[in-house]
Image (cartoon, grey):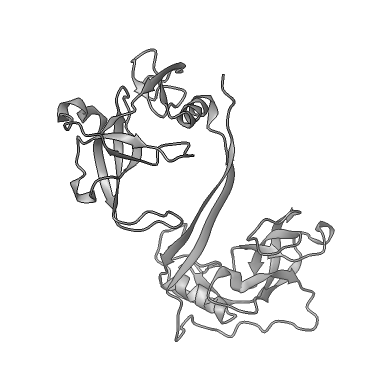
Amino acid sequence: MPEVLKAPLVVEFPFTRSLGPVQSAFLTGLRERVVLGVRTTDGRTLVPPVEYDPVTADELRDLVEVAATGTVTTWAWNHAPRRGQPLGTPFAWVLVRLDGADTALLHALDAPGPDVVRTGMRVRVRWAGERSGAITDIACFEPYDGGPGTPAGPTGHDGSFTDPVTGIVAPARLDYVYSPGRAQSAHLQALSERRTVGERCPSCRKVYVPPRGACPTCGVATTEQVEVGPRGTVTTYCIVNIKARNLDIEVPYVYAHIALDGADLALHGRIGGIPYDQVRMGLRVEPVWTEDGRHPDHYRPAGEPDAEYETYKELL
């Protein structure tokens, strides 16, 4: 049995979204060192504000300012901060019910250790030095005893701003270790030898590439290895017109589903060696490997007549 593989992977992308009137006012308020909530029809004040009442589903637009001081309702100590978290030293994650609010806001509390953190402790907002209209405009919370430097109370701000924030771009990132398991480890090992291997279901006899370790139709384990390809048929495709970050491929290019000969499941692959507007369903293709590649770099026309639709229609 081949060694089961594992590798560290990172999924990262900028997440862009527009803001409605409530979220726009909330984030613009943070930029201006104002904390806004929204009042429900029954008089509750929700912070952070939402556009619809989670209890009644009523649309909410009545913005109300709350204080920059509050009370910890619950907490958890973070002894090893990760990249991108609010503080670089150990801190507490806290839920803080700001004075004037009926719900709690999640953020970081800068405290010297877990022994000083407690439910019911008083805290205040520590504002970031540079603010842009994001939740990070609150740098963190800090312990507050009501002494010197007491934050100013709410001024009755109604949420109207001359230069409101209308959208945000938030970086999204997930770091994890992926293990493909027995079946896909064997598949990847075969690819390093420039072979494509799938597994056959003992019940329906379909060959799945890449193998999944079990038949998705019958639900039984698959262990019989079957070498397929190397040639195949384009079953369907799309033309990519947006250049991907860190991918050195000129647009437009074609990404296709390719049914390798002997396989009962189409896999993904890029089509090269042919103008993008000449790629078609039924096109017969073959893999192209780079010198040190562990998988085909792309597929190119194999120089064979197009496959008849009847031969691949079940694999669309």
Q: Identify the residue at horizontal 44%, vertical 36% (top origin).
A: 295
Taking the image as shown, residue 35 lies to the left or right of residue 273, namely: right
Would you place residue 231 above or below residue 126 in this image? above
**Residue 189 percent location from the top left of the image:** 51, 28
Taking the image as shown, residue 231 lies to the left or right of residue 141, namely: left
Q: Identify the residue at horizontal 44%, vertical 22% (top origin).
A: 214
Check the image and name the residue furthest to the top. Answer: 202
In this rendered view, identify the residue nearer to me: 111 or 293. 293
Q: What is the quadrant of the N terminus in the image?
A: top right
**Residue 32 percent location from the top left of the image:** 56, 82
**Residue 39 percent location from the top left of the image:** 50, 71
Check the image and name the residue furthest to the right. Answer: 115
Q: Identify the residue at horizontal 65%, vertical 58% (top origin).
A: 83
**Residue 76 percent location from the top left of the image:** 72, 54
Taking the image as shown, residue 36 lies to the left or right of residue 22, namely: right
In this rendered view, identify the residue nearer to me: 42 or 45. 45
Would you place residue 59 above or below residue 197 in this image? below
Would you place residue 189 above or below residue 72 in this image? above
Would you place residue 231 above or below residue 219 in this image? below
Q: Can you tell which quarter of the image residue 153 is in? A: bottom right
In this rendered view, identify the residue nearer to me: 159 or 59. 159
Q: What is the quadrant of the C terminus in the image?
A: top left
Q: Identify the residue at horizontal 71%, vertical 56% (top origin).
A: 81
In this rendered view, identify the residue nearer to me: 119 or 18. 18
Q: Can you tell which quarter of the image residue 69 is in? A: bottom right
Task: Count how many numbered circles sit on residues in the image.
Answer: 0
